[in-house]
């Protein structure tokens, strides 16, 4: 490198202007705009001359303490040394006293600042034909690459900046490695601005540390050879990561990243890279929220094991799965706030297995499909301190899995749930239901949508619904649900046994169902008893009308008072003359009119029905009267049935009220 001014010979016009004004510290303007590739000699400056001045120059051309500031020059490489890394500007390992600002300059050769130190570096609006190599650069201030155009890789890996790295509106083109911007292990005390920038190749920020925001809002990123568009695994950003309105083709990697603020992808457009993933944020930890409102993702969004101090907000997002069939994977996600899938349109599985939410899982108005027999929403073992909200004009068109999930409440409209055979929520626990459909009939139809093909009956969803009904004060609905659960469970049991046993169980189950509701409605047995009481009253009164009731006492049957009341009775010469019954009176009525029968209990069809029906009741009817099988044998047969029904129904009622025949 030339060390004296004399070694440069006659200075070029632009060099002479720079020499004369560099001491002012002001911007030295060579031309009004970026020079063309065939720039005239008047705007050309040798790269070695700029390096010479940047390193202090000479006594007559010493730059201002503010540094060197140049605008609109064509910086021409002039180092003919074969072993030189670049014929252009090479300041590797150099310590610059002030700033180095090259604004709107065209630089055809690679700029090398590897290991250099500078107060601040500015390459705004420059055109770099062969990129920038500034690995391990140390800047006490900021590095400005605003609206830079680089046709080759830009390297700032391991650089340490006391201010910002500002690449707003810049354009980066990948080189041989496939990287457009390599900034692994970059340390920026301020923010990294990539807002509105374009990168045709991978932007690498592996292990980078950013004291403020990583702002890629409105950026246009295209993946490099790896299929990744932005690689920021292990990123440590004290502020937000902003992808708001970005257009990205390739994977955005934030694996294990730590964010002091939010991940803001509002309105972003993402298309998956080679691995089918659009956003890879597994194990990411953010103190704020992750915003995907109105985002459009064609590929898999991943938040496996991520931790968010706020919400995961996907409101009005459009998510489309690729080859793996999953549109969003958030298994093991921990969110202190809510997960909003409000008005989301998804084609592919949304997975929240084992996720822990401090608020709601809100699917209001969402339209979820998957295809290929996959679940549209898979939330197995999810734990939410808030509710599961599924209402509005949304619908889960494919399977919904909530097995072993736990939420505080279900807030829904029934039409939003999937059709029969596409709902799985065995082990699903909730404390309340808030819905316009709160009747047992409507909720049993809801439970009937469970997947049951080829599987044994699962009673837990019915028991859970009954518990919630009881806690909400709907006791009758709870009882109805448990009766239906018992019916289905017994039906399932009968389908798994042999034919003979199935017949026996069918009879027994039918009896229990009809009389006590499987022990859940023992009052049914009382209704049956009342029915038999009325039937017996009617039939025993009919027997009286047919003169088919007689004393249940052999002495009375042989007495003259009873015998004389028979139409076939003929008094002998030695028999006393009795008062005969009238022509239309029955033998029973005639007997009861005899003075001698006054001490014998009078027959009452009602009390006789009650006395013979209830086992522990003794009204002296059954011991004194009995149907006469000679006049009406049906009455005697019915009496046995009446007694058996009384015993059976009474025992079932007692067992039902005591809970002895409940399956649980």
Image (cartoon, helix red, strand yellow):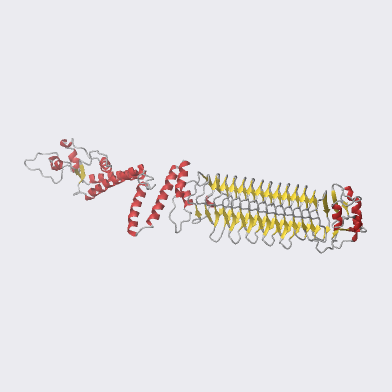
Tell me residue 365's x, y (percent).
Answer: 59, 51
Most foreground residue, 282 or 641: 282
Task: Examine the image and state in which quarter residue 277 appears.
Answer: bottom right
Q: Is residue 619 left or right of residue 78?
A: left
Most foreground residue, 369 or 582: 369
Q: Is residue 572 above or below residue 228?
A: above
Tell me residue 43's x, y (percent).
Answer: 89, 58
Q: Residue furthest left?
A: 573
- Number of disc labels: 0
Most foreground residue, 635 or 183: 183
Quarter occupied by the N terminus = bottom right
Tell me residue 2's x, y (percent).
Answer: 87, 57
Residue 397 seen from this side: no
Q: Residue furthest bottom?
A: 82
Residue 508 seen from this side: yes
Tell me residue 396's x, y (percent).
Answer: 55, 54
Q: Is residue 55 left or right of residue 522?
A: right
Q: Is residue 345 above or below residue 176?
A: above
* Residue drawn at 63 percent across, 60 percent down: 275
Q: Is residue 617 left or right of residue 245?
A: left
């Amino acid at each position: 490198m030339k060390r004296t001014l004399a070694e440069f010979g006659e200075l070029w016009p632009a060099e002479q202007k720079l020499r004369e004004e560099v001491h002012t510290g002001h911007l030295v303007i060579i031309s009004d705009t970026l020079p063309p590739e065939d720039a005239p000699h008047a705007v050309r400056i040798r790269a070695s001359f700029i390096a010479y001045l940047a390193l202090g120059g000479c006594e007559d051309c010493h730059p201002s303490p503010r540094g060197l500031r140049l605008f609109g020059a064509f910086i021409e490489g002039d180092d003919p040394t074969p072993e030189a890394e670049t014929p252009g500007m090479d300041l590797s390992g150099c310590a610059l006293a002030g700033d180095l600002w090259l604004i709107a300059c065209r630089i055809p050769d690679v700029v090398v600042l590897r290991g250099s130190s500078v107060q601040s570096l500015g390459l705004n609006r420059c055109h770099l034909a062969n990129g920038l190599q500034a690995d391990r650069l140390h800047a006490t201030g900021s590095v400005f690459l605003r609206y830079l155009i680089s046709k080759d890789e830009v390297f700032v890996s391991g650089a340490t900046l006391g201010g910002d790295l500002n690449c707003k509106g810049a354009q980066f083109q990948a080189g041989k490695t496939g990287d457009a911007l390599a900034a692994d292990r970059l340390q920026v005390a301020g923010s990294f601005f990539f807002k509105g920038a374009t990168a045709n190749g991978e932007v690498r920020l592996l292990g980078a540390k950013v004291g403020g925001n990583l702002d890629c809002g409105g950026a246009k990123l295209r993946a490099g050879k790896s299929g990744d568009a932005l690689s920021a695994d292990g990123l440590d950003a004290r502020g937000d990561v902003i992808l708001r309105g970005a257009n990205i083709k390739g994977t955005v990697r934030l694996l294990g990243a730590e964010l002091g603020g939010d991940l803001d992808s509002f309105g972003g457009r993402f298309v998956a890279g080679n691995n089918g993933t659009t956003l890879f944020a597994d194990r990411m930890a953010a103190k704020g929220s992750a915003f995907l409102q109105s985002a459009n993702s064609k590929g898999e969004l991943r938040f496996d094991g991520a931790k968010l101090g706020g919400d995961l907000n996907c409101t009005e997002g459009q998510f489309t799965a690729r080859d793996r069939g999953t549109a969003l994977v958030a298994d093991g996600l921990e969110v202190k706030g809510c997960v909003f899938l409000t008005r989301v349109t998804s084609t592919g599985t949304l997975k929240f297995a084992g996720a822990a939410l401090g608020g709601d899982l809100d699917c209001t108005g969402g339209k979820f499909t998957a295809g290929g027999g996959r679940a549209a929403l898979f939330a197995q073992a999810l734990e939410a301190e808030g509710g599961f909200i599924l209402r509005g004009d949304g619908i889960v068109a494919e399977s919904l899995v909530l097995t072993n999930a736990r939420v505080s409440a279900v807030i829904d409209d029934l039409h939003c749930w999937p059709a029969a055979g596409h709902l799985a929520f065995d082990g699903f626990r909730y404390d309340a239901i808030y819905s316009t459909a709160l009747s047992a009939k409507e909720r049993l139809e809801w439970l009937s949508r469970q997947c049951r093909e080829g599987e044994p009956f699962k009673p837990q969803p019915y028991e859970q619904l009954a518990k919630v009904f009881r806690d909400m004060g709907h006791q009758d609905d709870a009882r109805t649900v448990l009766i239906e659960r018992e019916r289905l469970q017994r039906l399932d049991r009968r389908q798994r046994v042999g034919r003979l046993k199935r017949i026996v169980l069918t009879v027994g189950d039918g009896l229990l169902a009809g009389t006590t509701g499987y022990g859940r409605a023992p009052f049914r047995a009382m209704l049956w008893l009342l029915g038999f009481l009325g039937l017996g009253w009617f039939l025993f009164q009919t027997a009286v009308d047919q003169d088919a009731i007689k004393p249940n006492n052999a002495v009375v049957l042989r007495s003259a008072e009873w015998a004389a009341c028979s139409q076939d009775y003929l008094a002998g010469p030695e028999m006393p003359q009795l008062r005969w019954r009238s022509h239309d009176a029955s033998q029973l009525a005639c007997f009861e009119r005899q003075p001698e029968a006054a001490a014998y209990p009078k027959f009452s069809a009602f009390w006789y029905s009650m006395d013979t029906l209830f086992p522990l009741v003794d009204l002296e009817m059954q011991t004194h009267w009995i149907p006469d099988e000679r006049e009406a044998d049906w009455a005697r047969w019915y009496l046995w049935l009446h007694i058996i029904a009384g015993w059976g129904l009474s025992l079932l009622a007692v067992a039902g009220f005591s809970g002895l025949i409940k399956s649980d």
